[in-house]
Image: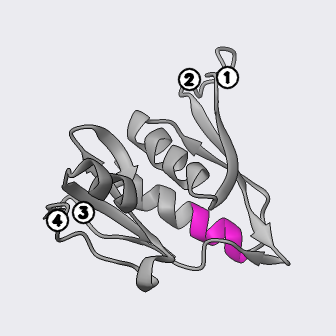
Amino acid sequence: MSMQDPIANMLTCLRNAQMVGEKVVRLPHSRLKADILKVLQEEGYIENFEVLAADKKKSDKIKKLQVNLKYYQGAPVIEKIKRVSRPGLRVYSSYTDLPVVRGGLGIVIVSTPMGVMADKKARSHRVGGEVLCIVE
């Protein structure tokens, strides 16, 4: 069975791993997922991530993303992560209409013509795009 929404799958894997207190999560690689993780790292929601090369000896010949999750006083830093735009219903927004999450304490990750970025950076560059997810 094929995966319909790989971004939603990635967000669910991160959410589930943090619920059980995992330190590291491995996910299938894609450039968009790596861009989203880069934004999460820049904004301080994850420790770091790295791209692992495909293992040529095993049957699994797909690169992986290894994500090191971040916790503060035993609680996950990401309280809530939600997919907004999905394959069945794309959500686009101009930079003036980007949602504000928790009065600026959360972020909105946006895919713009200038790349994937947080809402604050998109507003400063005066560019809108597809609203991928909301992180609190």
Q: Position of residue 82 (x, y in %)?
A: 41, 73
Q: Earlier in the sequence, mark 4 or mark 3?
A: 3
Q: Magenta segment, which residues? A: 14-19
Q: Is residue 86 above or below residue 77?
A: above
Residue pointed to by mark 4? 91
Q: Residues within 10 Å of mark 2 (few under 14, many from 20)?
A: few
Q: Nearer the viewer, residue 31 or 26?
A: 31
Residue pointed to by mark 2? 61
Mark in front: 4 vs 3: 4
Q: Which residue is the extreme one toward the top?
A: 56
Q: Nearer the viewer, residue 114 or 96?
A: 96
Q: Position of residue 99 (x, y in %)?
A: 28, 75
Real-space Cα separation, disc 1 to disc 3, in angstroms: 33 Å
At a point 45% along the width and 49% down the height, the residue shown is 36
Q: Earlier in the sequence, mark 4 or mark 2?
A: 2
SS at circle 3: loop
Q: Earlier in the sequence, mark 3 or mark 2?
A: 2
SS at circle 1: loop
SS at circle 4: loop
Mark in front: 1 vs 3: 3
Which label is found at residue 1? Answer: none
Q: Amino acid at mark 3?
A: Arg
Mark in front: 1 vs 4: 4
Q: Amino acid at mark 4?
A: Val
Location of residue 60 by image quarter: top right
Residue pointed to by mark 3? 86
Label 1 near label 2: C-beta < 8 Å?
yes
Q: Is residue 121 above or below residue 75?
A: above
